[in-house]
């Protein structure tokens, strides 16, 4: 009986489709069936007695096998006995394969043997890989399908939504998860969805109907297929849905009735083969300049583009792309061409391969883009102008000290040279120096960031100062300046700096216009009393003038006729704003030749002083009695110049360099007036003033300041808070006399 059982077991082992491998406690192969020979490629005769690990266990796992075997034989817990495990094995040719292993232990004739049943899992693994690949393809199909697909639970929450559906509602598939139709659809559409879901839950039957839904792309029509998904018990676990967008088809079925009669966007259908127009709505005819009730036969062979070559490229594009959004081009119309944005799709129209188009007039958009580009350029130019203004202010300030010396010394030189052969030369030097001084002061006034300050100001003096500033540019361009300045004009009530900026802008615009004109080039500046009682300032040129279509927009912000980089388009708009803020006006006066701009500004109230120059202007008298003065500056040359002017006024003047030196002199000295520079290294003007108020309060009302830094916020703040009189560099004789008189009068009081 035992022999029969052994024979039976041997037969089963030989016939088994699974690999049967028997090893002893040393890991040596005791038996190896035919399936193992076929699977691993080793004949039984070659493996019996050899280590199984060297035969079918991959090299990188052999050490682990020996370690586990030794631990078990020493009494440890087995990791692989009496269970099914999936591992990797190796073949005779070096390749590997996945296997399922079930191993048991048996004692035979006093020997511990281990029998392993090994099953090749290659087919199953490949099947699983194919399944995963199939699932991936299915996922890709769902995500890329041009139709809505979803899966909801019984409560109406979306468990899956494909990308097409997400795009329809302006979300991502992830954002849609766990939402319900109430969260994404209109109330009416959500109610319809809930009603259909209930029908499916009640009947267990699919529902097919046509529905309409409001999406981010507008109202959509669709054939909706909604169906139950059952679980293993036969209950409805989910509700699936597939929505096929039939909007285009329904419009085609209705012959595009609504489109033809009501749609404000130009739409048409054309043959995909020869681009012959088959159907067009009234908006399309209006877009191309034809009556809205025109017949499609009038445009059946419509050439889209204004340019023939571009039209050919467009037709090639139609063939290359089944769909396209926002193709921008210059489209033809009856009276010319215009910027248009065209979108298209390939469709089946009445059994014919066709293209459906929409066309939008984007001329306004293009104008806005051009305007935006001009705005960017204007902003860039404005930033450059701000930087230039800062640079101009810095340069002007740096020029102040040496220019103050030149002006002061020129004044002294002219006075000393009076009645000598060099008197005329000294006078020319003084006038040139004073002209430089006025130009620098004008630069500083224009660069100041201060609130407008309206006061009575002489109009002709403003004109002369502005012309002096623009003199070099006008002369270098061969432009003759003609002055027609009215006499006995009332003063303006205006901010002189802002009015100067407006005049300078008009003069520079005329200069640039005249550069392209042949000689003679002439600029005329006129001042007169207008009929309405305001004061008129007129700037005219004999240049090319301003065309009628441009004249209508010339005061628009950022509108310019100059090449890019040559103008910002903000000058005239800015000037108009200043004029209107003053209660005045600025207009382009129609003329036969050239361009004429008239600036009208209100006159000063009658109570303001008359600023018209007197025939013999009064000159402040020098100081009668000998008084002591202290000049404080960190530049000795400038201090000596100022001291010379004070001495010529009859003041006994002492010079000290720097604030520290001034304090030493003031500790015990007595002075009738003190003139200090504002900015000095070490102890500056504000610190010196603080020391005087604390240590010599009797001198606090005798100090005045000389500064070239009225742009700096620190200097402006100090002068405003201290309330002390000051003069700006470069200074004039009259300014010094006025300051001295004010200080001596205050100290006497």
Image (cartoon, rainbow, N blue to C red):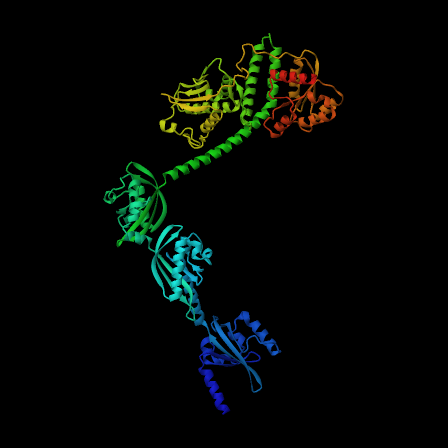
Indicate the quadrant where residue 110 lies.
Answer: bottom right
Q: Tell which of 290 and 212 is nearer to you.
A: 212
Side of 164 relative to 719 (left or right): left
Residue 207 appears left or right of 51: left
Residue 466 x/y as whole percent: 50, 21
Residue 577 left/right relative to 419: left
Would you place residue 3 above or below residue 443 in this image?
below
In what quadrant of the picture does the C terminus appear? top right
Q: Quadrant of residue 371?
A: top left
Pinpoint residue 401: horizontal percent, then vertical percent: 61, 23
Q: Residue furthest left?
A: 297
Furthest residue toward right: 668
Whether residue 580 can be seen here: yes
Q: Is residue 728 left or right of residue 161?
A: right
Q: Who is closer to the viewer here, 286 or 388?
A: 286
**In the image shown, does 244 or 604 lie closer to the viewer?**
604
In the displayed image of the protein, which residue is found farthest to the bottom? 1
User: In this rendering, is residue 122 above or below 632?
Assistant: below
Could you say where residue 472 lies in the image, as x and y percent from the top left? 49, 21
Report if residue 40 is visible in the image: no
Q: Position of residue 710 (x, y in %)?
A: 60, 26
Residue drawn at x 38%, y 64% as measured from the top left: 200
Q: Is residue 728 above or below residue 345?
A: above
The image quadrant that residue 416 belongs to is top right
Q: Give the number of callouts.
A: 0
């Amino acid at each position: 009986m035992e022999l029969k059982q052994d024979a039976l077991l041997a037969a089963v082992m030989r016939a088994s489709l699974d690999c049967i491998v028997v090893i002893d406690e040393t890991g040596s192969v005791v038996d190896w069936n035919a399936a193992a020979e076929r699977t691993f490629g080793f004949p039984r005769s070659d493996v019996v007695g050899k280590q199984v690990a060297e035969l079918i266990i991959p090299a990188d796992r052999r050490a682990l096998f020996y370690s586990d075997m030794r631990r078990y034989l020493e009494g440890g817990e087995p990791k692989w006995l009496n269970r099914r495990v999936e591992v990797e094995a190796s073949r005779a040719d070096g390749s590997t394969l996945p296997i399922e292993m079930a191993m048991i232990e048996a004692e035979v004739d006093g020997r511990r043997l281990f029998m392993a049943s090994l099953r090749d899992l290659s087919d199953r693994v490949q099947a699983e890989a194919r399944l995963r690949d199939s699932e991936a393809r299915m996922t890709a199909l769902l995500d890329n399908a041009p139709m809505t697909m979803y899966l909801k639970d019984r409560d109406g929450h979306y468990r899956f939504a494909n990308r097409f559906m997400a795009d329809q509602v302006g979300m991502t598939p992830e954002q849609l998860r766990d939402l319900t139709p109430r969260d994404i659809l209109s109330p009416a559409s959500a109610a319809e969805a809930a009603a259909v879901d209930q029908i499916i839950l009640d009947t267990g039957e699919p529902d097919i109907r046509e529905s309409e839904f409001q999406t981010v792309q507008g109202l959509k029509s669709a054939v909706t297929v909604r169906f139950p998904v059952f679980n293993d018990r036969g209950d409805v676990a989910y509700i699936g849905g597939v929505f096929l967008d039939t909007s285009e088809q329904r419009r085609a079925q209705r012959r595009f009735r609504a489109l033809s009669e009501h749609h404000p966007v130009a739409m048409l259908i054309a043959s995909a083969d020869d681009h012959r127009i088959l159907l067009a709505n009234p908006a399309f005819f209006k877009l191309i300049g034809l009556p809205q009730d025109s017949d499609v036969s009038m445009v059946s062979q419509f050439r889209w583009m204004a340019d023939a070559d571009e039209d050919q490229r467009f037709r090639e594009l139609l063939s290359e792309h089944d769909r396209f959004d926002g193709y921008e081009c210059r489209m033809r119309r009856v009276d010319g061409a215009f910027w248009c944005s065209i979108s298209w799709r390939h469709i089946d129209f009445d059994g014919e391969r066709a293209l459906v188009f929409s066309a939008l007039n984007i001329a306004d958009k293009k104008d806005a883009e051009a305007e935006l580009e001009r705005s960017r350029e204007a902003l860039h130019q404005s930033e450059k102008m701000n930087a230039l203004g800062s640079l101009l202010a810095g340069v002007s300030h740096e020029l102040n000290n040496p220019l103050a010396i030149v002006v002061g010394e020129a004044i002294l030189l002219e006075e000393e040279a009076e009645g000598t052969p060099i008197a005329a030369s000294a006078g020319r030097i003084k006038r040139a120096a004073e002209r430089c001084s006025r130009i620098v002061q004008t630069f500083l006034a224009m660069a100041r960031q201060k609130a407008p300050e309206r006061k009575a100001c002489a109009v002709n003096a403003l004109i002369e100062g502005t012309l002096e500033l623009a003199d070099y540019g006008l002369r270098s361009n061969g432009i003759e300046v003609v002055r027609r300045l009215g006499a006995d004009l009332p003063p303006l009530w205006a901010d002189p700096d802002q009015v100067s900026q407006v005049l300078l802008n008009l003069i520079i615009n005329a200069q640039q216009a005249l550069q392209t004109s042949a000689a003679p080039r002439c600029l005329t500046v006129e001042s007169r009393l207008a009929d309405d009682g305001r004061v008129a300032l007129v700037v005219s040129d004999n240049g090319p003038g301003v065309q009628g279509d441009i004249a209508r927009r010339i005061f628009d912000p950022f509108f310019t006729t100059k090449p890019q980089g040559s103008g910002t388009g903000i000058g005239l708009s800015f000037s108009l704003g200043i004029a209107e803020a003053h209660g005045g006006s600025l207009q382009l006066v129609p003329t036969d030749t050239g361009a004429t701009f008239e600036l009208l500004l209100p006159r000063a109230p009658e109570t303001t002083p008359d600023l018209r120059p007197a025939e013999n202007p009064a000159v402040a008298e020098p100081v009668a009695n000998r008084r002591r003065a202290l000049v404080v500056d960190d530049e000795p040359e400038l201090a000596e110049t100022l001291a010379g002017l004070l001495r010529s006024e009859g003041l006994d003047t002492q010079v000290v360099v720097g604030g520290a030196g001034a304090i030493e002199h003031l500790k015990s000295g007595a002075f009738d007036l003190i003139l200090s520079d504002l900015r000095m290294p070490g102890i500056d003007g504000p610190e010196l003033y603080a020391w005087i108020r604390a240590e010599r309060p009797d001198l606090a009302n005798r100090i005045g300041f000389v500064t070239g830094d009225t742009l700096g916020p620190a200097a402006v703040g100090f002068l405003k808070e201290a309330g002390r009189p000051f003069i700006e560099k470069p200074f004039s004789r009259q300014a010094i006399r006025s300051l001295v008189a004010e200080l001596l009068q205050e100290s006497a009081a």
